[in-house]
Amino acid sequence: MTAIEIAAAVRAGTRTAVDVVEEHLAAIAAREDELHAFNLVLADEARAAAAAIDERVRAGDDPGPLAGVPVALKDNLCTRGIPTTCSSRILEGWRPPYDATVVERLRAAGAVIIGKTNLDEFAMGSSTENSAFGPTRNPHDPSRVPGGSSGGSAAAVAAGFAPVALGSDTGGSIRQPAALCGVVGVKPTYGVVSRYGLVAFASSLDQIGPFTTTVADAALVTEVIGGHDRHDSTSIPLPPPAITPTLHDGVDGLRVGRITDLPSGADPDVLARLDAAFDALADAGAKIVDVEVPAFTYGLTAYYLIAPAEASSNLARYDGVRYGLRVDAPDTNAMYMATRAAGFGDEVKRRIMLGTYALSAGYYEAYYGKALKVRRRIADDFARAYEHADVLLTPTSPTVAFPLGAKTDNPFAMYLCDTYTIPTNLAGGPGMSVPFGTGADGLPVGVQVLAPTLGEPTMFRVAQALEDAATKEQAG
Amino acid sequence: MSSLQVREGAGNLAAVSDRITTADVIHVAKLARLALTDEEITRMTAQLGDMLDHFADIDELDLEGVEPMTQPYPLSNVLRDDVVEPCLDRDEVLAAAPDVVDGRFRVPPIIGLAE
């Protein structure tokens, strides 16, 4: 059942939230040992929350648009009194003293939190192999990665552990795992969803968004978690986006951009599905237009200078003083050095080093300063492209899911996974991945839809048209 | 070169870039408050050098007069009314700390020990 179907049944009293939770806990019990999607399953808490929802329905209350819908949360979203680890030893056992805004909004809409999902440590990675607690595996083929960094959330939805999960997307960490696991994944416009209570990686790029099995569910969840929040000073002062009302308006007359200077390197099976997506949208009445977006060529470099720079600053707070791990030493500075050496994994250390270097005296202008100028160029590139196209279509990931261990020895090869997803994080516009058939070895392929800032309604219309076409294709 | 190609020798510890030295890495680790092992310093020097080589692709761009961009959706002077509101519970916050004394965070000596 989709989230919309579950909420309708629970609100109507035709199915209990407790029954829904039990069904998902049974799915978790059957396959979680094999997949390791979760850092923590909140079985008792979910049962209690579901019982409270059922009680409200019986009393004649409406618990909200997500009544009784189980939701899995990436384990970098703060949950009051419930461990939040970021899959890092440095935060192991930490219980946040407050809830993230998205968690409050989900609960207020009737959702039931079912667990905290695994991720690459501090959301740094593209395979979920950088977790201090071991990798998550892809439900479609457990010898392969689920993508990352929100791999646990993507796998949880793909495996039927929850109809909805939240992730965070700094350079593709929702969209890439969504593509590799065959589910819908959305990065909203920067500022649409409050980051309050999301453990910060790169503050000018991070954005929370949903994983779901359908485009309509993703639209609903984005509406529930979106909208201004006074606790986040970068939150756009607007009400939640209205996406659902126009979701089924179709794409007749919409201009869909094909990027002529897209960096090469995507596998042929992935590109074949992208071509099929253009054909499907053209058949539905969209106009395919060619556009140049040089941003895709320079995005990777700008991102891997800016994101680590911001991370090196944000992660300075893990110093063994206020929370998390402390390794004792005779003086405070030695305690900092030992705590951080013991608490952070290889990739996190690498990015802290890269970011610190890019910000250090003598190199600031050559690296960080230059990257900020490239970022402006990238935003300008998109703005020019969106004069000719309402949305852009690209592959989400250059490949289908790859085997565990395939890229762990070469950090830069792992970074290339994000080539197509990174640019819109730099510019700020929304992006989403929609499952669109299969590629090599029958594994899922995702197509990415990009739109200008606050272009969610149009982006979702295109995504819905792609989902409709994929459903039709599958039905033969 | 397509940005999706991995340079030959990437990840190979023998292919050391001249963009960053071991001394640079040791200096940066100190700035970042990270105690790195000798093995980590060697590996990090090679890996960071490899990345900086890749990142040279933006050197060809003419960025004269381009305004740096620090945030995607510029908002400025985001303020709230200056009124007293509930804040985090002190005991709950301190309960998460590694060491606490008299309602405060406790740390090892900051000064007075040998460098």
Image: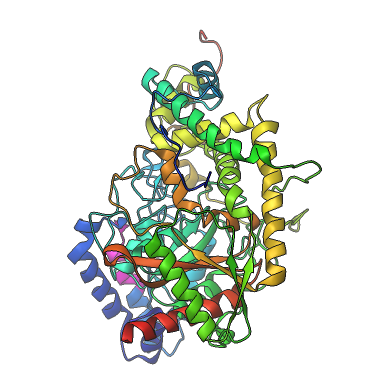
Residue at the extreme right of the image, as rendered: B65
Say which quadrant the C terminus of chain A sits in. bottom left
Q: Nearer the viewer, residue A410 or A46?
A: A410
Where A201 sits versus A252, above or below? above
User: What count of labels does the image hold?
Assistant: 0
Question: Horizontal and vertical percent for residue A438?
Answer: 33, 69
Q: Is residue B105 visible?
A: no
Whether residue B35 sits left or right of residue A157 in the image: it is right
Magenta stretch contains residue A46: yes
Where A416 sits versus A258, above or below? above
Question: Horizontal and vertical percent for residue A433?
Answer: 47, 67
Q: Nearer the viewer, residue A93 or A34?
A: A34
Question: Horizontal and vertical percent for residue B50?
Answer: 48, 31
Where A236 sits versus A472, above or below? above
Magenta stretch contains residue A63: no
Question: Horizontal and vertical percent for residue A308?
Answer: 55, 40
Where A465 sits versus A75, above or below? below
Q: Tell me the magenta residue range.
A: A40-49
Whether residue A53 sits left or right of residue B82 in the image: it is left
